[in-house]
Every structure is written in C-alpha cells, then in structure tokens.
C-alpha cells in the first residue's frame, strides 16, 4: 500500500488549503483514513479521521475549521482547511488503517504565516 499526499504550501492566516492523499495497492473495505500533523518540537497528533462509511472524528483544535472527506472509488482522502492559524503550521501526514495494518504517506508541509 502506498499513499501520496499533496496540496501543502504557504498560506496567510485566515486562508484556506486543501490537502489530498491517494492510496494505491491492496485497499480493503472497512478501512479508516486520516490526517495527522507534526509541528517542530512536538509529537505527531491526529487532526481528523474518516471511516469508509463516512463517520468522522476531529481534534478539538480544528473542529469547525477543517473538513475531512473521502472518495472511496478513488481511495482518496481530502482535508479542507479553512480559517488557518499560525498554530496549524506543521507537516501533515495521511494514513490508512486496514485490517490492523497502518500505512503512512510522505507528509506535506503547511506553513501559515504572513
């Protein structure tokens, strides 16, 4: 299984970005896809996750600002990030959890700065 993330970049506070992550290989139904982030000097943390049936989970810090979605036909997960803050600056990683195995993408850098 391979994950390819894209969509990071530099954005001003209050701006928006959309991250995408496409999974390829042996993808099974009933998986969970998610986005994590790791800021400099901090541990990696969950941002949002989505089950194949559509149930979602968000970190409190992004509720109301970020939206996770997925296209099961394309094995792709998205993260729409609005009202971005400097504290959202981090490397964002996507992952997929299926039948007890977890796979990670390569990470994409999001920098929120004026």
Image: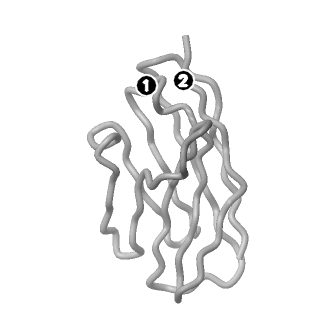
Q: In the visual, does 42 lie left or right of 52?
A: right
Extreme top residue here? Answer: 114
Q: Tag count in the figure?
A: 2
Residue at 59% across, 46% down: 92
SS of the residue under disc 2: strand
Vertical order, 69 against 109 (above or below): below
SS of the residue under disc 1: loop
Which quadrant holds the C terminus?
top right
Question: Which residue is disc 1 drawn over?
Answer: 85
Position in image of residue 79 (x %, y %) = 47, 48
Extreme front residue here? Answer: 41
Residue at 44% across, 37% down: 81
Vertical order, 9 against 94 (above or below): above
Q: In the visual, does 60 lie left or right of 110?
A: left
Q: Residues within 10 Å of mark 2 (few under 14, many from 20)?
A: many
Position in image of residue 18 (x %, y %) = 52, 40
Q: What is the spatial separation of the Cα atoms under label 2 and label 1, in whole angstroms? A: 6 Å
Q: Residues within 10 Å of mark 1 (few under 14, many from 20)?
A: some
Residue at 58% across, 58% down: 94
Position in image of residue 38 (x %, y %) = 57, 45
Which quadrant holds the N terminus?
bottom right
Position in image of residue 37 (x %, y %) = 54, 47
Vertical order, 39 against 59 (above or below): above
Residue at 53% across, 86% down: 100
Cβ–Cβ under 8 Å for marks 2 and 1 = yes
Residue 47: mark in rendering: none
- Closer-to-camera residue (99/4): 99
Question: Which residue is disc 2 drawn over?
Answer: 112
């Amino acid at each position: 299984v391979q994950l390819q993330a894209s969509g990071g970049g530099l954005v001003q506070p209050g701006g928006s970005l959309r991250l995408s992550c496409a999974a390829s290989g042996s993808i099974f139904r009933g998986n969970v896809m998610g986005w994590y982030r790791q800021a400099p000097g901090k541990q990696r943390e969950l941002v949002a996750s989505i089950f194949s049936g559509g149930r979602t989970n968000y970190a409190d810090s992004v509720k109301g600002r970020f939206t996770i979605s997925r296209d099961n036909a394309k094995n792709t997960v998205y993260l729409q990030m609005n009202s971005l803050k400097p504290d959202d600056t981090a490397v964002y990683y996507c992952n997929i959890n299926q039948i007890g195995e977890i796979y990670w993408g390569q990470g994409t850098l999001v920098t929120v700065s004026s």
